[in-house]
């Protein structure tokens, strides 16, 4: 079927680099062109949030899990026609959401919900016989994401914006937990491997009690934010989670990472996760700090930076190239950092120009990724695919 269907990262990462800018262009056009806004999907801000989470981030989740689980858990890879089918479901969901004004809400819901349901159904049989059973927890996280998306569509069918908004919050919590687990596992592993490859003898041991505390504190924090009724609970759980994850992140840092962009960007991305927790605690303590600031710190800062660094690394490694970020991608990391800062600033002191500038800057790194790695994703891998190398040939 061609190289595109030989691994999950190829079609989904390629689609994410195209679809992300499309969402931003649509949103900017809808906010500035009255004639265009009349023909766009309903519930503008909620639609925008849904497509960035369930659409754009959904593609990242699918591509990452389909690529990583065969290596991590020893699961059977989903490739060829089965991979193409999953991608088709994702694409049909996106088409349904864009045609929302002209389609029955139940039909849109079924088409959009199908991707996560079939992704979980496809992964579960491959994980059951795998040697690493703990990765079955991924299925539970996918179920949580599915429930969040389902709640959004139930709200859409009933015309209840509050219910739909809660669905997006549930999806965001599932994504945050998945992010904390994946980033918390990969960042120290990749840091250690990269530093050793660069000639630095270092070890970052796995601390089981701390990792359990990190998972439990994050779970309690997310439950508290979903409940959103007890301010003291949010402050207490959020502060505890922030401190645990700050200790966790502090164990990974080595000064030598500053010379390896694909590593320091992962550390910086995780720092934005900490910033998002801190902003949520501050918003509970002082209503003058909007909760949206926390959301944007996570989605633009943490996810945006990790997306750029991790996808670049996967594209290079799994196509047989040295794991060295191209200079344009490194520039894109700084642009994404600026986008995150402007977006949080726009939430703290609402101003149209700041938000619009952040949106435009957010698009630039995705287009850079598409320019630098798009051809790699469409072409056969080199003979050295799968080998780790941080040294240029």
Image: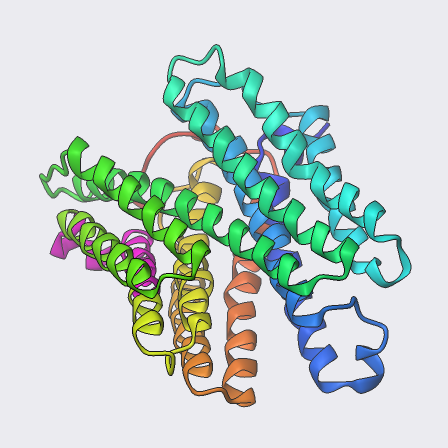
* Residue 126 image offset from top left, x and y in percent: 54, 17
Q: Does the magenta segment cover residue 17?
A: no
The residues colored magenta run: 252-277
* Residue 98 image offset from top left, x and y in percent: 79, 59
**Where is residue 291, by image quadrant?**
bottom left
Above/below status of 134 relative to 152: above
> What residue is shown at x 35% (from left), y 73% (from top)?
283
> What residue is shown at x 63% (from left), y 25% (from top)?
121
* Residue 199 image offset from top left, x and y in percent: 13, 42
Say if residue 82 shows up in the picture. Answer: yes
Total numbered labels: 0
Above/below status of 73 relative to 347: above
Q: Quadrant of the N terminus?
A: top right
In the rendered structure, the answer to whether residue 190 lies left or right of residue 69 reads left
In the rendered structure, the answer to whether residue 327 lies left or right of residue 58 reads left
Secondary structure predominantly adopted by residues drawn in magenta: helix
| In-front residue for pair 115/305 | 115
> What residue is shown at x 85% (from left), y 73% (from top)?
39
Question: Among all residues in the image, which is located at the extreme left?
Answer: 201
Say if residue 67 shows up in the picture. Answer: no
In the rendered structure, the answer to whether residue 212 lies left or right of residue 15 reads left
Q: Quadrant of the C terminus?
A: top left
| In-front residue for pair 292/230 | 230
> What residue is shown at x 24% (from left), y 58% (from top)?
236
| In-front residue for pair 293/284 | 284
Q: How is the image coloured?
A: rainbow
In the rendered structure, the answer to whether residue 30 lies left or right of residue 333 reads right
Question: Among all residues in the image, which is located at the extreme top?
Answer: 129
| In-front residue for pair 218/202 | 218
* Residue 68 image offset from top left, x and y in percent: 45, 32
């Amino acid at each position: 079927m061609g190289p595109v269907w030989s691994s999950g990262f190829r079609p989904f990462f390629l689609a994410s680099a195209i679809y992300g800018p499309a969402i931003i262009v649509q949103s900017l056009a809808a906010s500035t062109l009255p004639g265009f806004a009349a023909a766009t999907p309903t519930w503008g801000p909620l639609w925008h949030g849904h497509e960035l989470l369930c659409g754009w981030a959904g593609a990242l989740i699918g591509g990452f899990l389909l690529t990583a689980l065969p290596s991590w858990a020893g699961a059977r890879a989903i490739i060829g026609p089965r991979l193409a089918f999953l991608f088709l479901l994702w694409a049909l969901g996106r088409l349904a959401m864009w045609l929302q004004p002209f389609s029955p809400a139940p039909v849109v819901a079924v088409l959009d919900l199908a991707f996560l349901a079939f992704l979980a159904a496809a992964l579960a049989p491959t994980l059951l016989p795998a040697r690493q059973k703990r990765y079955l927890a991924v299925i539970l996280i996918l179920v949580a994401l599915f429930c969040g998306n389902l709640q959004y569509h139930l709200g859409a069918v009933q015309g209840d914006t509050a219910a739909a908004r809660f669905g997006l919050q549930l999806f965001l919590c599932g994504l945050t937990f998945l992010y904390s687990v994946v980033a918390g596992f990969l960042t120290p592993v990749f840091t250690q491997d990269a530093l050793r490859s660069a000639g630095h003898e270092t070890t970052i041991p796995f601390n089981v009690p701390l990792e359990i505390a990190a998972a439990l504190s994050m779970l309690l924090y997310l439950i508290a934010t979903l409940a959103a009724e007890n301010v003291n609970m949010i402050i207490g759980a959020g502060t505890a989670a922030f401190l645990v994850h700050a200790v966790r992140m502090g164990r990974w840092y080595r000064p030598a990472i500053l010379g390896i962009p694909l590593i320091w960007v992962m550390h910086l991305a995780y720092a934005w996760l900490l910033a998002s927790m801190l902003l949520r605690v501050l918003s509970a303590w002082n209503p003058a700090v909007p909760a949206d600031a926390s959301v944007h710190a996570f989605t633009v800062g943490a996810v945006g930076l990790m997306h750029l660094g991790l996808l670049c690394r996967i594209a290079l490694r799994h196509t047989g190239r040295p794991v060295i970020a191209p200079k344009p991608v490194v520039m894109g990391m700084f642009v994404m950092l600026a986008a995150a800062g402007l977006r949080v600033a726009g939430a703290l002191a609402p101003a149209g120009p700041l938000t619009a500038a952040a949106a435009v800057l957010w698009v630039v790194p995705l287009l850079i990724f598409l320019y630098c790695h798009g051809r790699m994703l469409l072409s056969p891998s080199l003979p050295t695919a799968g080998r780790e190398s941080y040294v240029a040939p």
